[in-house]
Amino acid sequence: LKGCEPTSIALIAHSLENAIQVGAPLYNRGDFASCYHVYEGAALDLERKLEKSCKSPQKALADGRKRAAGLKASHAQAWAMRDAFDGLLEVIQRWSIEQKR
């Protein structure tokens, strides 16, 4: 998260959590393609909104999108995006714990 402003870190967490709240029920209902598109859209939106100095989260999101786009099955695409989201959220959670120390 080096180079990211605290407001950007909060934006990442908020955006990803919102995307998961929308996408996960779609996935659970078997609408894998819609879930994937929600996740992909959230990632693209965040990549545009983050300042240029917040490179690592942008790269993680872009890598997740690239990986997902290379998969044929929509359920696998959705999971690839979710994996990228979960990884970023885990990093943010660890960062948040460190900030409180």
Image (cartoon, rainbow, N blue to C red):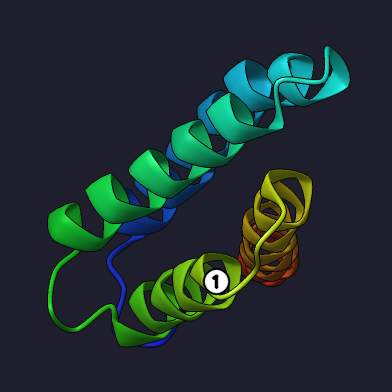
Instruction: Identify the residue at image location x=59%, y=17%.
Output: 22
- Against 94, residue 35 (above or below) is above
The quadrant in which the C terminus is found is: bottom right
SS of the residue under disc 1: helix
Rendered residue at 28%/78% (across/down): 54
Residue 31 as seen in the image, left or right of residue 2? right
Q: Residues within 10 Å of mark 1 (few under 14, many from 20)?
A: many
Q: What amino acid is at disc 1?
A: Gly
Which sits in the foreground, 99 or 85?
Answer: 85
State left or right for residue 32 relative to residue 38: right
Q: Does any portion of residue 74 appear in the rendered image? A: yes
Relative to 62, say whether 29 is above or below. Answer: above
41 up-or-down from 63: above or below? above
Residue at 25% x, 62% y is: 47
Q: Position of residue 92 (x, y in %)?
A: 62, 62
For mark 1, what is the residue?
Answer: 64
- Report x, y in % for residue 49: 16, 53
Q: Residue furthest right?
A: 28
Q: Is residue 14 visible?
A: no
Location of residue 90 by image quarter: bottom right
For this orientation, the residue located farthest to the front is 72
Q: Quadrant of residue 56?
A: bottom left
